[in-house]
Image: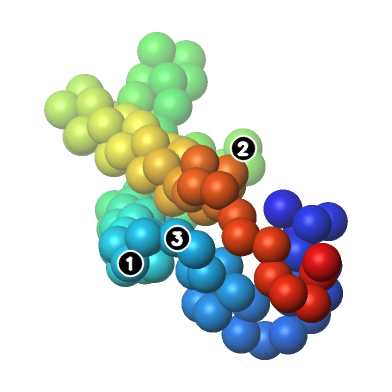
Amino acid sequence: MYALEYSAVKSRTFFWDVFAQGLPRWVVPSLKLLGLFFFLHFFIFLVQSHAASPEIKNGEFVLNNHGRIVKVLKESEFRWLKGSELRLFATGWMFFYFVPLMYWWFPRRQSASAA
């Protein structure tokens, strides 16, 4: 995508103007919605987990931040945070794959200047 649209990428309006050319009108609002959804999950997980990841260390449920135990958790808290972590990754995959999917799914029109 970057190589094909290099000249358009250099302009600051690439994403909302050039990217949307030839695409259905619902694509850009959907992209914004998925981005918002991902960043909300990211922020919520960051707050819930105290910027650490839920892990099992020595048979205990803990929040681990690069080898430092932030908090010891109950099993229910651990499972809740693991679910939040998986939702974060799922929304991230949806958001980051949606852009190239929409770019390649719909045929691009050749502009008069490119011909």
Q: Amino acid at mark 1?
A: Arg
Confirm whether residue 65 shows in the render: no
The residue at the point 52 percent across, 69 percent down is: 21
- Mark 3 in CB contact with mark 1 (< 8 angstroms): yes
Mark 3 crowdedness (10 Å alpha carbons): few <14, some 14-19, many ≥20: some
The residue at the point 34 percent across, 25 percent down is: 61
In the structure shown, which secondary structural element does the residue marked by tag 3 occupy? loop
When asked about the image quadrant of residue 43, the answer is: bottom left
37 sits left or right of 53 in the view: left
Residue on which the image places disc 3: 23
The residue at the point 69 percent across, 70 percent down is: 111
Residue on which the image places disc 1: 25
In the structure shown, which secondary structural element does the residue marked by tag 2 occupy? loop
Picture coordinates of residue 107, whole percent (x, y): 56, 48
Q: Which mark is residue 108?
A: none
The residue at the point 44 percent across, 27 percent down is: 55
Kindly report the distance in space between the C-alpha atoms of the residues bearing marks 3 and 1. Answer: 6 Å
Residue on which the image places disc 2: 67
Q: Amino acid at mark 2?
A: Gly
Mark 1 crowdedness (10 Å alpha carbons): few <14, some 14-19, many ≥20: few
